[in-house]
Amino acid sequence: MDSSSQKADIMVQISAGIIRWRFVIILIFLSAAVYCGLSLGKVRVNSDLTAFLSNETETRRGLTIMEENFVTFASEDIMVANVTYEMAESLAQQIREIVHVFSVSFDASPSHYSSASALLTVAYDCPDNTEEVREAKEQIRELLAPYDTYIYSMNMDNYSAQLASEMGGVIAIAAVVIVIILLFTSRSYFEVVIFFIVFVFAALLNMGTNFWLGEISTITHSIAIILQLALAIDYAIIFSHRYQDECLKVPSEREALTEALSKSIIEISSSSLTTISGLVALMLMQFRLGYDLGLVLSKGIVCSLITVFFLMPGPIMLFPGAIRRTGHKTLIPDITPWGKFLMRTKYVFVLLFLLLIPVAVFCSRHVTYAFNDHSVSELVYSESRAAMHKIENTFARSTSVVLLLPHENLEAEKAVYGEVKKLPEVKSVTALAGIQVGEEHVLTDLFTSRKFAELLEITQEESNLLFAAYGVHKEQYQAIFGTAEAYQVPLVDMFLYLFDLIDRGIVNLSEEQLKTVSDLRPQLDFALSQLRGETYNRIVVSADVPVEGEESIALVEDLRSIAEQYYPRGSVLVVGDITSARDLRSSYTGDSTLISLLTITFVFIILLFTFKTIVGSAILVFVIQGSIWINFTFPYLLHSVPSFVTNMIVSAIQMGATVDYAIVLMNRYLGLKSSLPRKEAMALAVNQSFATVLTSGSIMTIAGFLIGLRVSDVYVSHIGLAVGRGAFTSVILVLTVLPQLLVLMDKAIEKTSFRFSLVEAKE
């Protein structure tokens, strides 16, 4: 018995076993579905793209330090249009009086009042998404309801809820459209029901097991389910159609199903390899979003394969009569005349393609990509982003940058603060050194016992005792044994020590003194939680520069240069949208080329083993790569600015997934060519592959376009649009250029064909 017969027998035995144990398997899948359903709420989703930067980047290191050292309180920008300055000032004062509003920044400067519009920057005294902040925001919105108001805030919970709602709508519409497509292209109406049973289980298994990964990105969480559907629905279609073909040959439905499953396992597994290879290439990106998306989608493909192979035979065996009774003639038109037209016109489409490719390469390589969400072109406007643009177009732009400084040297921090304020691009600077106490002092000033006594209006003896106790607490004994008058303590540290003693009941102040301290305490607590950590202090700089560009990078280097005059080189970190955009750009430069090369290499190797022809494999890769270049010509021609992640993610998905369309055509052509002339074989191959290409391609196209045109998240929408556009482009090329190119290069394909066997043939 040869190796192919042995392999076939093994697959038949496995298939028979799956069918025999179908009820047990169904029970296992139901249990797994319950487990995964209960696990959906455990999946942690991160909406911050910078979280997926390499740990070696300055931005990631800085953000980690800030997460460990500081509390970030809620804030938002509120623009009130068509108001006088006096009206805006009154509104600002009313907002200040709302509980949990810490401050409202508003003045007569162009940064806050311009063109009869007011910009109120509201800071709260609690982190975002707390009940206190939600109530305060609700009161503000009720107050501003009669006015023309635009509110922009980075509320991740609201963002996630809106994205989930939009994707829910997309999935609902996509489900209806896909049902229509499947009814149109199916052979039995009931098989569509089975398809959706299979897909629901596959999607649930993939989504429910995401919590094993610890954390996934919002982008992955949003688009994984619909991309899984688009990428893997044809596995169920292939199996179902194979079963119906076998039913015509074998009288027993059980035997037909066994034979169909044994053949489908190999066929579908081979088909999935190109898709998985593109996703694996994504996982090798330096920017960990690629790993995140590639892993989840690869897992989704595996879940789909397992569900088709193990679960799908059960419903088919349970409802064979329903499949037969709802059978119908195919509604797919016969496009053999189109195939003949392609053969009559010889190489017209090939010539057009070859002329178009240099233009497409040029355009695709000159697309402007954004490395910050503020710079991405909107496809669908959200209320929040509309408010953001309204504010940016009315008032001077403002970009925040954070300087992280080792916290022990407050004098150096004060010097840095002073120099940073002098930079021409800087609008405002928030730091401990800028928070005033009284009219003449700031929190970083060094105070002697005498100066502190004058500030708080306590006796010199009381101040001396306080300073001496502080010295003992800090193991600094100069206040007791040295020159007490020369002993200096930063004002912020002295206040903190005093508050601690008051809380413990060790120090009692007069009512007037206590009022002075109590009035200062909320401001001090707020400042310390925002600006002082255990290992680092931070200075927040607001500057009139764009997020991306040479001007922005120059500001970052100026800030670093100033800080490193007072701190050891390498101990200072500069963090913000500017640095994250810079780090993302840096990772993209290497990742983009790497992903393209790896995807092409992986797919080419798989095609080489599949078809055993070098030229034939190269042609398939070339046509699909051409569709990728054409796909990314559109942003250039439309002057659209997509996110950089769009290029890397969609290129890998498009190459890995849509090359399947080319594989279907190639398989049909090679099979028919053995018994028919080349042109006749290709005309028939185009017709025979049309149903599969149309079904899979239209599902991916529609799913992508729905995401692109209905989701307001700029990352998700651009990825969706490019996926849909790429699938459509690939379908067009496979049904026009590829047939002519394969016939044109037929002799070269044959000459570069080879045979190999893992087992030597015996005489």
Image (tube, rainbow, N blue to C red):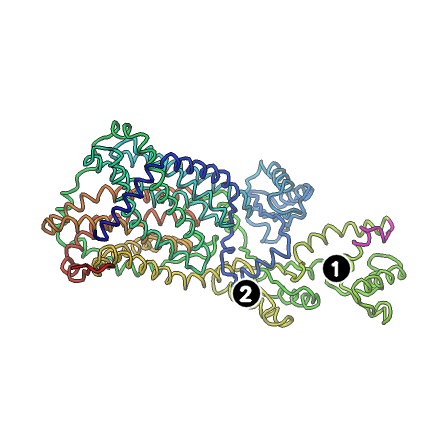
Mark 1: give few (<14), some (14-19) or many (20+) Cα within 10 Å. many
Residue 672 spot, x, y in % from top left:
14, 48
Which residue is the site of mark 2? 556
* Mark 1 or 2, nearer chain start: 1
Locate the C terminus by quadrant: bottom left
Residue 664 spot, x, y in % from top left:
23, 48
Amino acid on which disc 1 is placed: Val
Residue 262 spot, x, y in % from top left:
27, 43
Mark 2: give few (<14), some (14-19) or many (20+) Cα within 10 Å. many
Q: Is residue 453 above or below residue 144?
A: below
Task: Report the label total.
Answer: 2
Q: Name the one closer to the observer, 672 or 413.
A: 672
Q: Which residues are magenta?
A: 500-510
Quadrant for residue 564, please give it: bottom right
Q: Name the one closer to the observer, 358 or 41.
A: 41
Residue 726 visible in the displayed image = no
